[in-house]
Structures are given as structure tokens and as C-alpha cells.
Image (cartoon, rainbow, N blue to C red):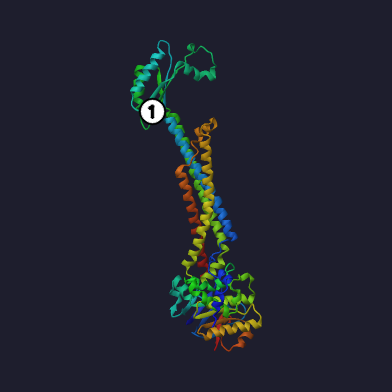
């Protein structure tokens, strides 16, 4: 006797369509695609904000370190004192102090060049009381005793004054701190907006799926089963959206970094590097973007689970 | 199988839509649930399906007091009940075959284990040629039969049907009734909610009549 399923087995075209391959939650709904787009856009914006904040932090710390690695000593010419001898004494005293990597006194010609943009060339600089600069480079990580150095200089060369750029560094620190706080604040705001918009988009996508939740409930599915189905589906949607948005941001930062490296030896590139650092978000930045992708997927999945549970509570 | 004792139901702060319900549904029994539109037939079916909680009274099902059941416990009891909705509630993105197999999929069964069973049932309800069709292209009668097949595929002990002949012509209505009678003969208790007098006259069965929120039983 021929059973109905024998007939079915003999019909390959029918069998192909039979396996229960269709996901319980529809994969390609309009609401699902919109949600993916929202997650992609918001992840991109959040990643750009993260990268920008990290760049500001890194550039601020670079500026600070650059300025903090140098101090300058100025020796004023006054009648009755030999300026060259005073400069030599200062160099000697400074070299003897600890934590100093290099001491370089500007020559008379170099000093003249420094004032050339204001006074013009060809002046008899001997007649002008132009102070002599001594640039002191500090050893990396060293904290020289500037009070002792000042005291030693005052004792032997009273016309020398040491500028450790403290005032400038303090202002720089305040400015860098403000930039960092502003960066973090913008990042937190963007993140909050991202979470909210992803949650609302998930809620919109879930509204279209309410009949599915109800049918599953009525045919005896446990709440855990229903929530699991939706959570898995929305985790994939969120991950897809996050990967598109985060991937685009990674690509953008990668291209910026490559362009920066390519322009590094040009005057324009050097100016950009001086202002913004090396325009790289570093490994930390790329890791932060990857984390954001995972975070967006989790937010989408948890939002869907929460909404399913609320729908089920309303049905029951 | 099901016992209602002094059951009352109200939605929110409104008046009771069902009151003082005292009746039972025995295993292997067949009954019509009838009454005018808005009498509360669907609400009573939802109480029997455990998708509503009574405002007062006691409902015991399969020897369990439903008031003390956990969510999973309620879901487990629901698996012993099949439901046919007035509006079918088939999932449009799934084929007829997948819709009918859904209760078994929810139970975690392997597709290879239930495929033959689902195919056989679809042939039995006359949908053998429509297995891979999506619900939007099915006729009203085909949808109704698919919904019935989905309700009985997991061999429920109780079948609830809400206006199962409401969307079909009288001829198909009679065929569907014969289907329910066949299921009942195979051991499934059947409750058919309908206000189709002609359908009820087709088969001599117990009648539960809802009127003004109260239930009158005619054995």
C-alpha cells in the first residue's frame, strides 16, 4: 500500500520546500531591515565619536609631553657683564644638574635669527639688548630639581632666569582636561541616543511580530522558548547592523591613518601631525569599536527579550 | 478534564462579562458552546486555554488548580489543548506544512520524526497538494483546515474551536463538522463555539449556552 509520504518522497520539488527551514521569526521583514539600518547608522556615529574622543585625548597628552620635555633659560645682557661667559656658566651649571639630557645655547647668530621676523635682517644686533636662549632637554621620565637649579643659577649668574613652562603646561593640562571631558560627555550622549533609538527601533520591529508571539504562546511554547527565538533573531540583526556601522568606522579610521602616514613627510602632513597627533585611534580605539558592535547587538537582543516578555505578560 | 466552579471574569473595572460559571468538560466529550454575539464565548474559550485568568472562582484542568500553576506549568497544560481561531492565525511567512508542524517544533521534536505525521494529516484534511503554499494564497476553507490541522497535530486531549465554520460555505461547514466528529471518535474532547444553529442541528451533542454572562447547560 502506498502511504501519502511515499508519494511525497517521490516528489523532490515538494520535498525541497518541506524541511522546516523557515525561521519562526521572519528573517527579511521591512521592520527588520529598518532596524539593521538604524543600528548601523548609530554604531557608525558612536564609533566616530569614540575615535574622535580617543584622538583628542591622545593629541592633548602628546602636546603636554612635548612641552614638558623642554625648559628654557634666558640670560639677559646687562652692562658690566660678559654675556658669553654668563651663557657658558649657565650651560656648565645646567649640565651638572641631574635629569638633563641635552643643553644647547643659542649662538648670537641664532638669537638674531629668532628676532629677524620682527626686526628685519641686517641690523646691528650688538647694539640691542637681545637675551640669549639656552634650550635644556630633559631626560625621559626625569624630574629635575628646578628649585635647586634656579638657586645655583641665581648665585652665579643673576641675569639668568629659568622658565620650566609650568604656567603653559598648566593651561595645556586644563585645556586637554576640558577636551577629554567634552569628548567623554559627547560619547556618553551619543551612546545614550544610540541605546534609545535602537530600543525604539526594536520595539517597532517587534510590533510587527506580535501575532507570532501570540500564536507561539497559544500552541504551548514556554515564555523562555519564545523570548529565546526573538532574542536570537534580534541579536543577529543587531550584530549585522553593528558590524556594518562599526566596520565603516574602522575603514574610515584606517584610511585616515594610511593617508596620514602617506603625507607624513610633507609640510602639510607635519602640520596636521603637530596639531592632531598621528591621527590614529590605536589598538585601543579599534578594540573599543569592536566592543561597541557587540554592545549594540546585545542592546538589540535584550530590548527584544524585554518587549517579548511584556507582550507575553499582556497576553496572559 | 476541566472543572469551573463559581468562575467570574471582568475586564478591568468593568462589569463581569462571565459570572457564576459552574460546569465541567469530560474527556472524550463533544459539546457546542453557543450564545448571541458578545455573550462571552471567546472569553470562555480563552479561560479554557489558560490565556486569561478568572477574576474569581476556581478552574481546575487535568487535575491541576490553574491558580497555582507557574508560567511554564500553564504552557505545559496548553500543549494538551488544541485551539482553532476564528481568524485562523496562521503565520504568513511559513508554508502550510510549517504552520501545521509548529506545535511539534515548539515541543522541540526533530523534523525527521514528525514529517510523515504532518504530511499524513495534511492529506487527511485535503491539503496534500497545498503543503508548500503560503497562507496568503490559501482560500478561506483551506486556511480553516490548516488551522484545524495545526490544532490537532500534537494529539491534544481537548480541542477548542472558535466559530470554525464562520468563514466557510455550509457545505464546507458540514465537512469540517465531520472532521471534528472524527477527531472526537478518536478520543479528543471537542468544544465548538458557534452561533450557527444549522451546524448544531447537524449533530446531536451537549450544548453550553451563554446568556447575559451566565452559562446554561443542555445535556
The single residue placed furthest to the top in the displayed view is: A80
Residue A116: image x %, image y %?
52, 18
Residue A24 location, x and y as percent? 53, 66
Quarter of image, res A100: top left
Taking depth in this image into account, of A281 and B112 the one nearest to the observer is: B112
Compared across the picture, whether A98 is left or right of A182 comes to left
Quarter of the picture containing the N terminus of chain A is: bottom right
Vertical position of residue A274 compared to residue A31: above or below: above
What is the chain letter for disc 1?
A
Q: Is residue A214 visible?
A: yes
Residue B83 visible at all: no
The answer to which image quadrant residue A167 occupies is top left
Badge 1 density bin: few <14, some 14–19, many ≥20, Cα 10 Å: some
The residue drawn where x is 37% and y is 29% is A139
Q: Nearer the viewer, residue A65 or A277?
A: A277
Q: Secondary structure at mark 1?
A: strand
Above or below, A203 against B39 in this view is: above
| Location of residue B192 with respect to A50 vertically, above or below | below
Q: Position of residue B28 (x, y in %)?
A: 50, 85
Total marks shown come to: 1
Q: Nearer the viewer, residue A180 or B169?
A: B169
Q: For mark 1, what is the residue?
A: A138
Residue placed most toward the observer, A224 or A10: A10
Residue B140 position, x and y percent, is 64, 75
Amino acid at each position: 500500500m502506498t502511504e501519502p509520504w511515499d508519494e511525497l518522497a517521490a516528489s523532490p520539488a515538494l520535498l525541497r520546500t518541506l524541511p522546516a527551514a523557515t525561521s519562526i521569526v521572519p528573517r527579511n521583514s521591512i521592520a527588520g531591515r529598518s532596524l539593521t539600518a538604524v543600528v548601523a547608522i548609530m554604531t557608525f556615529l558612536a564609533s566616530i565619536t569614540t575615535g574622535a574622543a580617543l584622538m583628542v585625548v591622545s593629541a592633548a597628552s602628546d602636546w603636554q609631553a612635548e612641552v614638558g620635555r623642554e625648559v628654557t633659560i634666558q640670560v639677559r645682557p646687562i652692562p658690566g657683564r660678559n654675556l658669553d661667559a654668563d651663557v657658558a656658566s649657565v650651560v656648565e651649571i645646567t649640565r651638572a644638574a641631574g635629569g638633563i639630557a641635552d643643553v644647547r645655547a643659542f649662538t648670537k647668530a641664532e638669537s638674531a635669527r629668532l628676532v629677524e621676523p620682527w626686526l628685519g635682517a641686517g641690523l646691528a644686533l650688538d647694539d640691542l639688548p637681545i637675551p640669549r636662549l639656552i634650550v635644556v632637554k630633559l631626560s625621559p621620565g626625569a624630574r629635575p630639581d628646578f628649585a635647586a637649579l634656579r638657586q645655583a643659577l641665581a648665585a652665579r649668574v643673576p641675569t639668568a632666569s629659568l622658565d620650566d613652562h609650568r604656567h603653559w603646561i598648566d593651561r595645556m593640562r586644563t585645556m586637554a582636561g576640558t577636551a577629554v571631558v567634552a569628548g567623554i560627555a559627547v560619547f556618553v550622549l551619543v551612546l545614550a541616543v544610540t541605546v534609545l533609538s535602537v530600543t525604539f527601533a526594536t520595539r517597532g520591529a517587534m510590533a510587527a511580530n506580535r501575532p507570532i508571539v501570540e500564536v507561539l504562546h497559544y500552541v504551548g511554547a514556554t515564555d523562555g522558548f519564545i523570548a529565546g527565538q526573538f532574542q536570537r533573531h534580534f541579536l543577529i540583526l543587531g550584530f549585522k547592523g553593528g558590524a556594518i556601522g562599526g566596520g565603516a568606522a574602522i575603514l574610515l579610521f584606517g584610511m585616515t591613518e594610511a593617508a596620514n602616514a602617506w603625507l607624513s613627510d610633507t609640510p602639510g602632513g607635519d602640520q596636521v601631525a603637530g596639531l592632531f597627533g598621528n591621527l590614529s585611534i590605536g589598538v585601543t580605539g579599534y578594540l573599543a569599536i569592536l566592543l561597541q558592535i557587540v554592545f549594540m547587538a546585545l542592546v538589540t537582543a535584550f530590548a527584544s527579550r524585554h518587549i517579548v516578555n511584556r507582550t507575553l505578560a499582556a497576553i496572559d | 478534564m476541566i472543572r469551573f466552579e463559581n468562575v467570574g471574569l471582568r475586564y478591568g473595572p468593568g462589569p463581569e462579562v462571565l459570572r457564576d460559571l459552574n460546569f465541567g468538560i469530560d474527556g472524550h466529550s463533544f459539546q457546542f458552546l453557543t450564545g448571541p454575539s458578545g455573550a462571552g464565548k471567546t472569553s470562555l474559550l480563552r479561560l479554557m486555554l489558560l490565556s486569561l485568568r478568572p477574576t474569581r472562582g476556581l478552574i481546575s484542568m487535568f487535575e491541576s488548580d490553574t491558580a497555582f500553576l507557574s508560567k511554564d506549568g500553564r504552557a505545559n497544560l496548553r500543549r494538551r489543548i488544541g485551539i482553532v481561531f476564528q481568524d485562523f492565525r496562521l503565520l504568513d511567512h511559513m508554508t502550510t506544512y510549517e504552520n501545521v508542524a509548529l506545535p511539534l517544533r515548539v515541543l522541540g521534536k526533530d523534523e525527521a520524526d514528525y514529517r510523515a505525521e504532518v504530511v499524513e494529516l495534511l492529506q487527511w484534511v485535503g491539503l496534500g497538494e497545498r503543503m508548500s503554499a503560503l497562507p496568503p494564497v490559501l482560500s478561506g476553507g483551506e486556511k480553516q483546515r490548516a488551522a484545524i490541522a495545526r490544532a490537532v497535530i500534537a494529539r491534544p486531549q481537548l480541542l477548542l474551536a472558535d466559530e470554525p465554520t464562520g468563514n466557510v460555505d455550509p457545505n464546507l461547514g458540514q465537512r469540517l463538522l465531520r472532521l471534528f466528529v472524527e477527531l472526537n471518535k478518536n478520543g479528543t474532547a471537542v468544544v465548538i463555539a458557534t452561533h450557527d444553529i444549522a451546524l448544531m442541528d447537524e449533530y446531536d451533542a451537549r450544548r453550553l449556552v451563554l446568556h447575559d454572562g451566565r452559562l446554561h447547560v443542555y445535556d
